[in-house]
Image (cartoon, grey):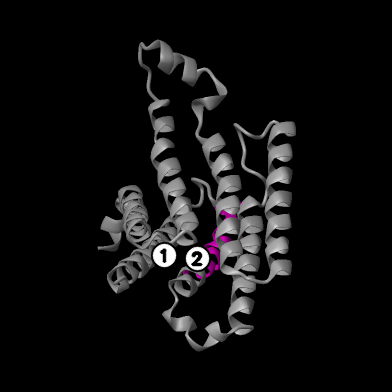
């Protein structure tokens, strides 16, 4: 069973990602929930980038086609630039999502400043360091985890400081925020020790794939369950 999952890591991951995005889309369409819409956009961004990034695998081949030859000989040969774009856009979408959940203007401004600061810094770094097409931002995942953790903490504070504390367990946003936070914290160590990710260390490669797979399955299925449950609660 485990070997089957590991050997089918990519299709299984893509499947649970698109399930969550589709479930979220059905919920938003029926509920007209403008706040959750930003989170669903984040899910579709992930799906879009993951599927589009597959093009880089074709670059390993040789085809007698002008467009293929042009891309293969250009900086777009790898898909790193796609993930660099995604890294910035996802923080913008999540920032907007959490900003809508929080009524405290000071905390909203904190989120706005953090999103703008991260976006500007990322764009300048990737452009002026010539890393946009070739490398991701150093410690990028850890920085995004800290930002997401900050967003979630502000959201928790908004619950504690309001009457929502009495019914927080009924809110889909609480489960979405908690799931995303736990996922980010769980897989961050894999990126801290990414220097061990090499062909000389097959055990770490296997462990990394195993943890990432199960973390993704649990997270996206949780999102899917939350959206399906919320969908059927709509009158």
Whether 66 is among the magenta residues is no
Left or right: where does residue 18 sit relative to residue 172? left
Q: Residues within 10 Å of mark 1 (few under 14, many from 20)?
A: many
Residue shown at the point (41%, 36%) measured from the top left: 52
Q: Which residue is mark 1?
A: 219
The residue that appears at 31% across and 57% down in the rendered structure is 26
What is the x, y in percent for residue 124? 73, 38
Q: Quadrant of residue 2?
A: bottom left
Q: Residue, x 50% and y 65% (percent of image)? A: 180
Whether residues under marks 1 and 2 lie with C-beta atoms below 8 angstroms apart, the answer is yes
* Quadrant of res 100: bottom right
List x then y, in percent, for residue 59.
42, 25
Q: Quadrant of residue 50?
A: top left
Query: For the residue labelled by badge 2, is the local secondary structure a helix, a strand or a loop?
Result: helix
Tag 2 residue? 180
Which quarter of the figure is the C terminus placed in? bottom left
Q: Position of residue 210 (x, y in %)?
A: 40, 60
Q: CA distance from mark 1 to mark 2?
A: 7 Å
The prevailing secondary structure element of the residues shown in magenta is: helix
The relative height of residue 157 versus residue 179 in the rendered view (above or below) is below
Q: How many marks?
A: 2
Which region of the structure is painted magenta?
179-196
Q: Nearer the viewer, residue 8 or 14?
A: 14
Q: Is residue 132 left or right of residue 207?
A: right
Is residue 146 toward the left or the right of residue 85 in the image?
right
Q: Earlier in the sequence, mark 1 or mark 2?
A: 2
Q: Residues within 10 Å of mark 2 (few under 14, many from 20)?
A: many
Residue 99 is situated, as x and y percent measured from the top left of the image, at 61, 62
């Amino acid at each position: 069973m485990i070997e089957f999952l590991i050997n089918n890591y990519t299709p299984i991951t893509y499947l649970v990602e698109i399930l969550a995005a589709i479930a979220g889309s059905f919920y938003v369409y029926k509920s007209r929930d403008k706040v959750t819409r930003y989170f669903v956009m984040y899910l579709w961004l992930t799906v879009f980038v993951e599927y589009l990034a597959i093009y880089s695998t074709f670059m390993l081949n040789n085809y007698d086609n002008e467009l293929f030859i042009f891309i293969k000989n250009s900086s777009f040969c790898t898909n790193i630039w796609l993930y660099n774009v995604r890294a910035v856009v996802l923080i913008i979408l999540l920032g907007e999502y959490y900003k809508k959940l929080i009524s405290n203007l000071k905390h909203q401004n904190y989120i706005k400043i953090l999103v703008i600061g991260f976006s500007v810094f990322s764009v300048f770094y990737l452009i002026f360091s010539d890393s946009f097409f070739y490398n991701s931002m150093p410690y990028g995942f850890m920085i995004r985890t800290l930002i997401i953790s900050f967003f979630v903490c502000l959201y928790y504070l908004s619950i504690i400081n309001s009457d929502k504390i009495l019914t927080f367990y009924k809110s889909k946003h609480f489960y979405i925020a908690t799931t995303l936070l736990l996922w980010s914290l769980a897989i961050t160590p894999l990126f801290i020790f990414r220097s061990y990710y090499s062909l000389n260390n097959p055990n770490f490669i296997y462990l990394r794939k195993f943890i990432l797979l199960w973390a993704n399955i649990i997270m996206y299925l949780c999102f899917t369950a939350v959206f399906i449950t919320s969908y059927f609660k709509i009158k």
